[in-house]
Amino acid sequence: MTALLLLAGTTAVLVTLRAVVHYAIRASLAAPRLRETETPAARGLAFETVRIPTTNGRLLHAWLIPAEAAGRAPAVVIVHGWGGNAQMMLPLAGPLHRAGFATLLIDARCHGLSDADSFASLPRFAEDASHACDWLAGRAEIDPQRIALLGHSVGAGAVLLAASRRDDVAAVVSVAAFAHPQEMMNRWLAGRHVPGIVARYILGHVERTIAHRFDDIAPLRSITRLDCPVLLVHGEHDTVVPPADARRILAAARPGTVELLSLPGDHESFVDMEREIAGVVAFLQRAGL
């Protein structure tokens, strides 16, 4: 009886310890929530604040900036990166608006002013982008055949994944995408001096939590399933995601479907934002939007 009690007590301690460790992993990897402090109005843009249904019964906060011209307009769904929000993507809105595009800037779940969920992940970013695309396609003023997806960092990987699961995305713009999420997480963990054996356990736990293998959601894999035009944009001095990642994604793509635009700048911004966005606009127009 004493041995059984000891075994039961040890098991309870181990189960509790495991739960504590998993909670600590999730807490350490959780994205910071930064809520918007200004709206598109600060940039002289008319807009509509909307709530978009997504997976798990959650709602996304988003800003819809309509095109000026009458009739059904081309549109771009814009997805921020990890810990970001729609406000951080506003520098794109003005140039796209002036070029005749409607824009939908969303907050992913657990970000900005959107609903919380049990966790955020690249696949959940992709789900949110896809639901936003569906919502936008249902608007009378939007041409559902001319909707593009644009994302930054994790958002970039997400729009590639979302587009790889659909056949109605007109084009994709991927800004500062990492080639593989496991490599990105390994760099992050190494920067915090996490021992290798612990890092491997963390990565395995993350895969189990998000219910996806990293290999299956990696941009290196998504790009192979895309037929629509894709523009990879990457800063030449990006120290968060090496520029070599963009070249690897390009090399993995089907020939003739992907362009690479390397620009002076880092992970968060480019030297001449207005001029560089003109290159994105030109790509979207070449893609038929």
Image (tube, rainbow, N blue to C red):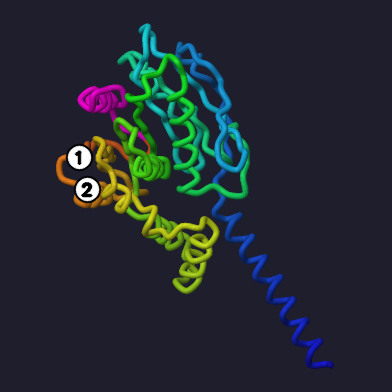
Q: Is residue 141 above or below residue 268?
A: above
Q: Which residue is mark 2?
A: 253
Query: Mostly what secondary structure, the magenta segment?
Result: helix
Amino acid type at mark 2: Ala
Q: In which image quadrant can residue 176 be found?
A: top left
Q: Tell me which residue sits at (57%, 55%) in the image.
A: 28
For label 2, the crowd category at 10 Å Cα-Cα, with few meaning under 14, some 14 to 19 and many 20 or more, is many
Whether the magenta-drawn stretch holds residue 276 is answered as yes
For label 1, the crowd category at 10 Å Cα-Cα, with few meaning under 14, some 14 to 19 and many 20 or more, is some
Whether the magenta-drawn stretch holds residue 286 is answered as yes
Give left or right: position of 133 versus 243: right
- Name the residue furthest left: 256
Closer to us: 282 or 162? 162
Question: What is the x, y in percent for residue 123?
Answer: 46, 48
Considering the numbered disc 2 on the image, is that residue within a helix, a strand or a loop? loop
Amino acid type at mark 1: Thr
- Name the residue furthest right: 1
Give the CA separation, mark 1 to mark 2: 7 Å
- The range drawn in magenta is 269-289
Task: Find residue 257 and name its label.
Answer: 1
Considering the numbered disc 1 on the image, is that residue within a helix, a strand or a loop? loop
Q: Tell me which residue sits at (79%, 93%) in the image.
A: 3
Q: Is residue 199 above or below residue 128?
A: below
